[in-house]
């Protein structure tokens, strides 16, 4: 699973079918219950792994840390005790190491069958990934990049979704994902709550939140299901108040139909259209238009029905600043042309994110509501590859992938 310093530029890839798995919190609520009384969903979304926290009661105002172990490897660390980070400390590295100062260390010791080699850390502002390395008894943290976190749902019960690239895990988009994990909820001074995922934290209280604790239980996430069809591409775009969903398939054999399913929260899906499969040789492209999309965020997936059963595809999401929006990005030399059509006037933030989930540029755009093209200079010359361009406003965001050269 771990391939250190791996850099991937994915131009064209075949995306495997996968699944979303949900896990309950451990039922504890010492920090208010946002995590312990919440629900975690993990989705293999082709080139992306999504970690979605459906918040329980209480504010999500601390940091959620997932320690991840790929069971076929013997690498990783046996404890967070003495974990060294050579970068500039921040809230994410503090949460992953569990150490704020010499007297404020919430050490986790791991069981013999669980040696995490990766830590995924996020809060409502964003997140970081760290490789966990044990070299001759010395434990190190190596940063592997950052990633965005987007909230959805209403203010009283939002869901926070972390978008991590599979390349950050040392994986290709077509790789099967299999790992064991546990999650812990911790404050910015490494004061650990008893809330988490995959461990009951028996006897662990806020009074002893700087005492060592041995992990007792972990969860497993695995996506190994496959269909006799390959999903070459699956994407959605806003088209003047409607959302057009396109997908291309190859190796289409004995497929009955494709059911397009939609959700407002990324968990609860309903069928909105059915398309009969052609079972043609070569690549085949299908299109379905959602004429009445949900206000705000729209999640889509395909249920592929074959003779004898069905499975679901990865999930894609459109985060619209306005349902009646037309957002497109093209590169013109050392600048980006941003087409803004039918978008409400206001302040927007344009973010360029590389394939490792790192934010390489952030630019503020003031839009007067008049259709047109805004030109944004690239502050530095990016390396050739696929980037995600996110246009964000107070009411949501839209995203487009682009090949920069």
Image (cartoon, helix red, strand yellow):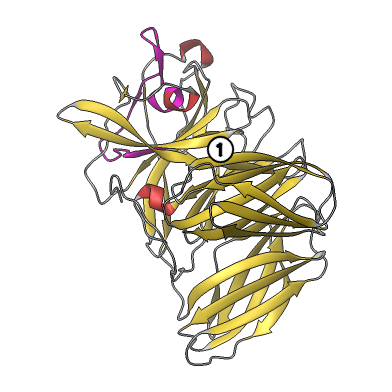
Farthest-out residue, front = 333
Q: In this view, does 250 lie above or below 58?
A: below
Among the 4 quarters of the image, the one containing residue 76: top left
* Magenta region includes residue 137: no
Which stretch did the figure color magenta? 94-120
Q: Is residue 26 visible?
A: no
Q: Which residue is found at the position 44% from the left and 57% from the top? A: 385
For residue 274, say whether it is visible: yes
Q: How many labels does the image show?
A: 1
Dot 1: within a 10 Å radius of its alpha carbon, few (fewer than 14), some, or many (20 or more) residues?
A: many
Q: In this view, does 219 lie to the left or right of 123?
A: left
Q: Residue 263: give x, y in percent of width and height.
A: 71, 59
Residue nearer the viewer, 57 or 188: 188
Q: On the rendered structure, is 316 left or right of 270?
A: left
- Mark 1 residue element: loop
Q: Which of 66 and 84 is in front in this view?
A: 84
Q: In the image, is residue 314 above or below residue 148?
A: below
* Left-right relation of 170 to 197: left
Residue 400 locus on image (x, y percent): 61, 58
Q: Is residue 257 above or below residue 149?
A: below
Instruction: Please name whichever residue, 172 or 160, is drawn nearer the observer in this view of the structure.
Output: 172
Q: In which quarter of the image is residue 236?
A: bottom right
Q: Residue at x 53, y 52 (%)?
A: 334
Can you name the residue that lies furthest to the top here? Answer: 103
Residue 208: x and y in percent read 46, 12
Q: Name the residue under label 1.
A: 25
- Residue 208 sits above or below residue 259 on the image: above
Residue 84, position in %: x, y? 30, 23
Q: Residue at the spot x=81%, y=70% of the render?
A: 291
């Amino acid at each position: 699973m771990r391939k250190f310093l791996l850099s991937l530029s994915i131009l064209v890839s075949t995306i495997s079918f996968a699944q979303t798995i949900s896990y309950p919190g451990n039922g504890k609520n010492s920090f208010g219950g946002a995590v312990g009384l919440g629900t975690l969903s993990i989705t293999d979304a082709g080139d992306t792994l999504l970690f979605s926290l459906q918040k329980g009661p209480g504010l999500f105002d601390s940091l959620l840390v997932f320690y991840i172990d790929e069971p076929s490897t013997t690498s990783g660390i046996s404890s967070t005790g003495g974990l060294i980070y050579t970068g500039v400390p921040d809230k994410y590295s503090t949460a992953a190491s569990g150490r704020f100062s010499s007297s404020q260390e919430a050490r986790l010791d791991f069981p013999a069958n669980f040696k995490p080699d990766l830590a995924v850390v996020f809060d409502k502002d964003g997140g970081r990934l760290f490789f966990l390395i044990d070299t001759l008894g010395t434990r190190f943290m190596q940063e592997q990049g950052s990633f965005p976190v987007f909230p959805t749902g209403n203010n009283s019960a939002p869901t926070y979704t972390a978008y991590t690239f599979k390349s950050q895990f040392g994986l290709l988009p077509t790789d099967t994902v299999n790992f064991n994990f546990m999650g812990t909820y911790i404050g910015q001074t490494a004061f650990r709550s008893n809330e988490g995922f995959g461990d009951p934290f028996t006897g662990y209280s806020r009074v002893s939140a700087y005492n060592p604790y041995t992990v007792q239980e972990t969860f497993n996430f695995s996506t190994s299901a496959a269909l006799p069809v390959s999903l070459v591409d699956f994407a959605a775009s806003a088209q003047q108040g409607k959302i057009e969903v396109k997908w291309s398939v190859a190796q289409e054999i004995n497929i009955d139909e494709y059911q397009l399913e939609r959700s407002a929260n990324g968990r609860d899906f309903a069928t909105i259209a059915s398309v009969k499969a052609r079972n043609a040789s070569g690549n085949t492209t299908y299109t379905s238009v959602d004429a009445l999309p949900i206000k705000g965020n729209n999640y889509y997936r395909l249920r592929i029905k074959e003779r004898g059963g069905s499975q679901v595809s990865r999930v894609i999401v459109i985060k619209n600043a306005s349902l009646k929006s037309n957002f497109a990005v093209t590169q013109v030399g050392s600048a980006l042309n941003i087409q803004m059509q039918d978008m409400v006037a206001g302040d927007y933030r344009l973010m360029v994110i590389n394939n490792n989930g790192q934010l390489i540029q952030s630019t503020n755009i003031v839009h007067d509501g008049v259709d047109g093209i805004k030109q944004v200079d690239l502050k530095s010359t990016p390396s050739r590859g696929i980037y995600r361009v996110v246009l964000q406003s107070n009411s949501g965001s839209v995203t487009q992938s682009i090949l920069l050269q």
